[in-house]
């Protein structure tokens, strides 16, 4: 729109003959001109435009934006596509902002990062990040309506539980160790609650289920909707050689890698030391101290821990959830067979196995199910799409949490 | 070193006449050659070398490393120099890694980020970051010996307290709101402890003192060394229009800026609603419920809150700490004068004011001190170098925490 057409040419002699309407137009013209000039000035001076990213568009797509006028190639990689790590090329606009827009996205928590001339960069316009081992990625949530996955993972206007980083003594491991504890909003120090023990995988720690798994949001929302019994959720650190998450124990701010999580030199395994955790939780919190008020579930390595715990302490828990579990059946092992028989003779209320069709541990889980089938041990099996990913573990947590402590 | 000079030229006929020592040299030569070739291969294929950053060198300097073979200009900006945001140019090595080394650094917690061809980038080799409003920066800690600042801010092998994100009801603000609560390691649900209320500044929230302020590490370490009485530390959210930190309430994952923290539309101010916090803490936790077991301190805006709280509720607290406080004296205001007189007539055990020489609020603090002096109100004054920065607030917390609940 050219504002000059609204106003006669300005010269000193004609100034006083302007109508009020024309004055207004002149003022508008000058203002628009100043804005345009200052905008050009910013660009000329290399000033940074305000960048919002990601933008959740009204049509259900999501646009990523990244300002870098000198970059040659920028792309965004994330879990928003058909394939696990889909990459979208970003296109540079005149103001130096690179952009790309996804297809319409289903309700979900998504993660992504940028690649700028080959270097992985997190989005400087998005301060919401998750750490997985030593890598930070940005996250965002898409939701359409109450009850969808995005709604389940986001913070809604519902009563919120308490999330605590708690240190406890493990006599078996000879350490002070850290766990995360979720107390439901109704926890008041008087009423007693059942406890779900929720275990992370290899590379994880006591922060994993809260951050990557959105455990406190899922529990808050399921409890608020009455889909789930109010319960305490205990998320311990499952690495016997690490007292706590990286940076939170006296090893300092090391860069975690696979080696940080090996068990060499540990005084005991996670499974062997597990009753230290249960004993601490029962002593510190208002728990219902009986089998029917205890559940244990975990993903991958934590699914393996759950498996071991199930046959080591069959009298302690009534609900078991094996999520994409690294759960290896011991063949031709009379002691193992006896332990499993004792477990199933104790008639646990739920033995639940969940895994994605593309999970690399599918064969191990098939072997476990064959073993259970051949012994007529009852269990529930849930299979869905996808592989060994947090997207599935959030689903499994939500399903399992709704199945426990109700009978 | 050229390994070839150690070994005779190899040909099939002379092979069997090699001495064992020469065999060894040949094997070494081949191995070194393979390493060199594989190294070149990685570069040729654009493979990423393993980068460690930052590296805390034995001589007390710190080296930053960043891999980007195609970048034109890389630098690091942080608080490791004489000036607040010192920038060091980084130099590219043959393997595509850019590096810069600081001078010898004093014990301290430092923060930094990279600039890559003009774009601010956080260090992908360092997963330890702090968020300030909406900006992430990397951190690292330098320590030389027990008792220095780095040692005070790092996690040591001492008993650790519990850090909790707790929701409480504020009837005055008509909201469910979030606070961070530190319980000392000795907290067992039986023994009662005094309480320090620790308030953040403008742009902060209930996570600020824990993350940027290292409050739990400082308290763990001071208590372990017997320098500080075991106490509960309560870090509420001081923004009356925000229920919680960004991303942790139902406003969703917005990008926080200055507008997020204004008080427009709030039902009451932080100071007016403050007794909701005290009442909740006294009801929920094993506190010593008397004036001599309550302290309140805060930085900047939180110092202003502390000031207001001091003259609104003089019977509730015995220790006050104003850190770089936005504390404005009301001139020619009889009600204010009466409130201040009542405060000092109640003889608080400590009225402490701390500020850095370069703080932009120095004049406001000078005015406050003049007012106190002119009324013969006793206070303690602590002045150090530097300005309105977290480095100072960590120092003030450590000083104040050692001064309270001891008499």
Image (cartoon, coloured by chain):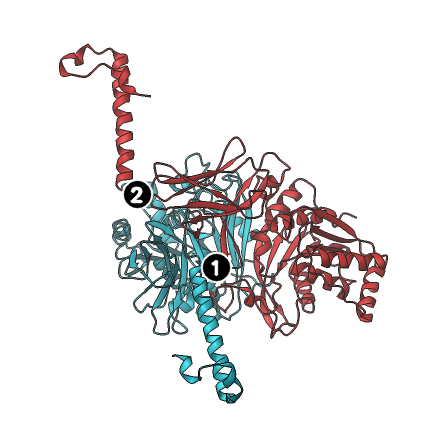
Chain colours: A cyan, B red
**Residue A365 position in % (x across, y down):** 28, 51
Q: Residue lying at the far left in this picture: please name it.
A: B13
The residue positioned farthest toward the front in the image shown = A13
- The x and y percentages for residue B349 are 80, 53
| Mark drawn on residue A330 | 2
> Where residue A111 appears, x then y in whole percent?
37, 58
Label 1, secondary structure: give it: helix
Q: Is residue A213 left or right of residue B342?
A: left
The disc, 1 or 2, on the residue closer to the chain's N-terminal end is 1
In the image, B134 versus A229, the foreground residue is B134
Above/below status of A240 relative to B302: above
Q: Is residue B405 above or below residue B15?
A: below
Q: Of the numbered discs in the image, which one, if any, rests on residue A148?
A: none
User: Seen in the image, is A377 located left or right of residue B327?
Assistant: left
Chain where mark 2 sits: A
Separation of disc 1 and disc 2 at Cα? 29 Å
The answer to whether residue A222 is seen in the rendering is no
Label 2: element kind: loop
Q: Which residue corresponds to the image point at 72% horizontal and 57% vertical from the top-left?
A: B363
The answer to whether residue A225 is above or below residue B222 is: below
Protein chain holding label 1: A
Compared across the picture, whether A398 is left or right of B384 comes to left
Please name the residue shown 75% across and 56% down the image. B366
User: Would residue B85 be seen by someone viewing this image from the given angle?
Assistant: yes
Q: Nearer the viewer, residue A117 or A104?
A: A117
Q: Which residue corresponds to mark 1?
A: A293
Using a 10 Å C-alpha cutoff, classify the residue at mark 2 as few (fewer than 14 neighbours), some (14 to 19) or many (20 or more): few
Q: Quadrant of the N terminus of chain B?
A: top left
């Amino acid at each position: 729109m050219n504002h000059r057409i609204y106003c006669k040419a300005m010269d000193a002699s004609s100034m006083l003959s302007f109508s009020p309407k024309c004055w207004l137009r002149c003022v508008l013209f000058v203002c628009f001109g100043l804005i345009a000039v200052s905008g050009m000035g910013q660009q000329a001076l290399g000033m940074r435009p305000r960048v919002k990213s990601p933008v959740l568009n009204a049509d259900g797509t999501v646009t990523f934006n990244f300002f870098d006028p000198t970059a040659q190639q920028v792309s965004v990689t994330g879990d928003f596509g058909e394939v696990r790590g889909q990459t979208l090329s970003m296109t540079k606009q005149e103001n130096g902002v690179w952009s790309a827009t996804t297809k319409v996205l289903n309700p979900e928590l998504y993660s992504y990062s940028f690649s700028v001339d080959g270097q992985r960069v997190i989005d400087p316009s998005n301060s919401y990040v998750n750490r997985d081992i030593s890598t930070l990625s940005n996250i965002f949530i898409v939701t359409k309506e109450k009850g969808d996955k995005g709604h389940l993972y986001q913070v809604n206007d519902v009563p919120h539980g308490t999330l605590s980083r708690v240190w406890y003594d493990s006599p078996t491991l000879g350490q002070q160790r850290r766990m995360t504890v979720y107390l439901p909003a109704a926890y008041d120090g008087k009423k007693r609650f059942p406890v779900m023990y929720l275990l992370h995988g290899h590379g994880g720690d006591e922060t994993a289920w809260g951050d990557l798994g959105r455990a406190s949001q899922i529990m808050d929302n399921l409890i608020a909707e009455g889909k789930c019994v109010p319960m305490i959720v205990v998320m311990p650190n499952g690495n016997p050689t690490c007292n706590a998450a990286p940076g939170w124990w006296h090893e300092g701010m090391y860069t975690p890698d696979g080696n940080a999580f090996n068990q060499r030199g540990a005084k005991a395994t996670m499974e062997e030391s597990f009753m230290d955790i249960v004993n601490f939780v029962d002593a510190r919190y208002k728990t219902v101290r009986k089998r029917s008020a205890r559940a244990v579930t975990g993903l991958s390595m934590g699914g393996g821990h759950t498996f071991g715990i199930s046959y080591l302490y069959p009298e302690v828990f009534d609900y078991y959830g094996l999520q994409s579990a690294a759960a290896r059946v011991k063949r031709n092992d009379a002691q193992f067979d006896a332990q499993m028989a004792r477990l199933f003779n104790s008639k646990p209320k739920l033995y639940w196995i969940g895994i994605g069709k593309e999970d690399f541990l599918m064969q191990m889980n098939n072997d476990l199910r064959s073993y259970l089938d051949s012994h007529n041990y009852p269990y529930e099996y849930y299979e869905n799409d996808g592989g060994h990913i947090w997207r599935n573990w959030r689903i499994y947590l939500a399903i399992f949490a709704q199945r426990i402590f109700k009978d």
